[in-house]
Amino acid sequence: MEVHYLIRKPILLEARFRIRGFTVLLGESGVGKTTLLRALAGLVKAEGKPYGGLPPERRPVGYLPQDLALFPHMTAWENVAFPLRTGQRRQQALALLERVGLLEHAHKRPNQLSGGQRQRVALARALARNPELLLLDEPTSALDPLTKDQVLGELVDLIRREGIPTLAVSHDPILARMADWLVVMGPGTILQEGPPEEVYSAPSQLLVARLLGYENLFPARIEPGGVEVNGIHLRLSLPPWARPGDTAWVGIRAEEVIVVRQDRPPPAENVLEGVLANLHPEGLAYRGVFQGAIRLQVLLPRHVQARLNLRPEQRLQVVLKTHYLHLMPGEAD
Amino acid sequence: MDLLFWTALRLSLEVALLASLILLLLGIPLAWLMAFHRFPGKYLLEAVFLLPLVLPPTVLGFYVLLFLGPEGPWLRITGLSWAFRFEGLVFASVLFSLPFALTAYREAFLALDRNLLEVARTLGVPPWKTWGRVVLPLVWPGLLSGTLLAFAHTLGEFGVVLMVGGSIPGKTQMVSIYIYDLVQALRFEEASKAASVLLFLSLAILVAARTLEAKGRAWKSTT
């Protein structure tokens, strides 16, 4: 499904992107994600396709706001039955609850359900009007952090089984990884879209790279066969747009900075010498800072640290493999 | 207690009941407008509705009397002479208690989660159904509590009804004026009895209103 919307109020925003399967719209707070979602539901005035000009009542969408807005005085099945018009409303509602796996909780009120269960009641209620598009606002926010991943996974599976195109807006990279299609939004505009693995591995610009967790980003000057960063030459395969002499940005993920093992022959290229400025555990991994010609965030899996037994202040070599280095157009900040 | 007391009490209850029902019909759309819509002159309109709260009741009563009196515009426009009559008392009471009812109704509407109304729209439900199944079930405690407050407030009014109705025993003498007349006549024992009835009645109404308010809040804490 193609979306092209122009919103003037409450913020100026033009968005053009596709929705394919379970689509996640990723962006920082305040860029207009929720506004765009509400515009698709018809709750914010906008021009464009699809559904331009239709009131919310006439749009075939299922909208799940951030707080889900379940009717607090109704039981789960009454909530689901609310949009149903005729016939056996109770039977239909129970069937919908069964589809989302909540039949046994049909007689509970929203305050007796967990965050994940409330989310599925809201989904069943949205399904009751046979939407052709589902809109989810920050679906991770209502969930308990400890069980978030599992509950989200189940929700996404459920939505995939229903086969309804879905747009979920979020600032949570966990959700973005579960997407069939990832759209990245900046202030008032769409920055990039594509399959998540493509967007993650090849952000189109600095803003996208920052949003997707690239911690090591440097202004660079393009040279034949690579780039110059802070006086050192890094080899990498240049994309067609890159012309020697131009400025650009080069980035590498902290977990893709590789520490060179002293007992092995050193790699041929992109080896940097320096000092491990600090090192501390982060969950099951170790996070450190490498200080050489450039300063790099380093994230070591524990099996690597178990073998290398690195300590702060020690000298070491790191290698920036060419296929992990990512070049993006753009002037220095 | 003598017959005049019961007549006065009955008149007060009748005026208060009718005024409260009118307030309910008039106040709900007005409060909805004030809670959810913006329009030019809104603050001025709100100030006008709140005016009876700060005006001396005699001043409000004086203007109502001028409006309803033999030379007033009401008689000229409608041909109805309401001054010193039951209808005049009700008219004045509605104006007098409007700020109470309106403020309570508006609070009830503002406490309503706007997301519920928006989601109801996206579910393709007609407005009347949303009103019947979502809005009223959630706000009725607030509406009823506001109406009870307005009822109690009308029951206790003095200055306005004295100006508009005078104190015609058996016709426009409301119970508050009846008690005042007893005190003026130094009949303290009867005044004390009558006052205690009013005290008990008002307290019971306030307890009921508070109970309803707490019930209205109960839904909020569960979402």
Image: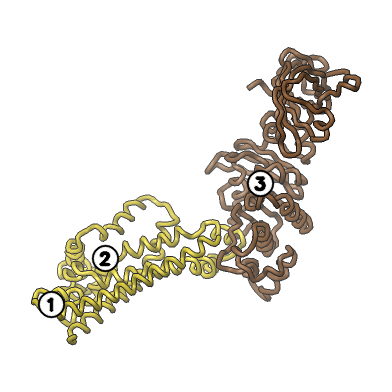
Chain colours: A brown, B yellow
Kind of residue indicated by mark 1: Phe
- Determine which residue is flagged by label 3: A169
- Determine which residue is flagged by label 2: B96
Q: Is residue A21 above or below residue A114?
A: above
Residues at marks 3 and 1 on the same chain: no
- Kindly indicate whether the residue at mark 2 contacts the one at mark 3 (C-beta within 8 angstroms): no
Q: Position of residue B191 (x, y in %)?
A: 16, 77
Residue displayed at 67% across by 43% down: A172
SS assignment at label 1: helix
Residue extending farthest to the left is B185
What is the chain letter for disc 1?
B
Kind of residue indicated by mark 2: Phe
- Kindly indicate whether the residue at mark 1 contacts the one at mark 3 (C-beta within 8 angstroms): no
What is the chain letter for disc 3?
A
Locate residue B25: give its quadrant. bottom left
Residue extending farthest to the bottom is B3
SS assignment at label 3: strand
Q: Position of residue A60 (x, y in %)?
A: 67, 58
Q: Is label 2 or label 1 in front?
A: 1
The local crowd at label 3, few if under 14, some if 14 to 19, many if 20 or more residues have their Cα within 10 Å, is: many
Residue extending farthest to the top is A231
| Residue A329 visible to an observer of this rendering | no
Quote the CA–CA distance across marks 2 and 1: 29 Å
- Determine which residue is flagged by label 1: B188
Q: Is label 3 or label 1 in front?
A: 1
Quote the CA–CA distance across marks 3 and 2: 50 Å
SS assignment at label 2: helix
Q: Is residue A158 above or below residue B187?
A: above
The local crowd at label 1, few if under 14, some if 14 to 19, many if 20 or more residues have their Cα within 10 Å, is: few
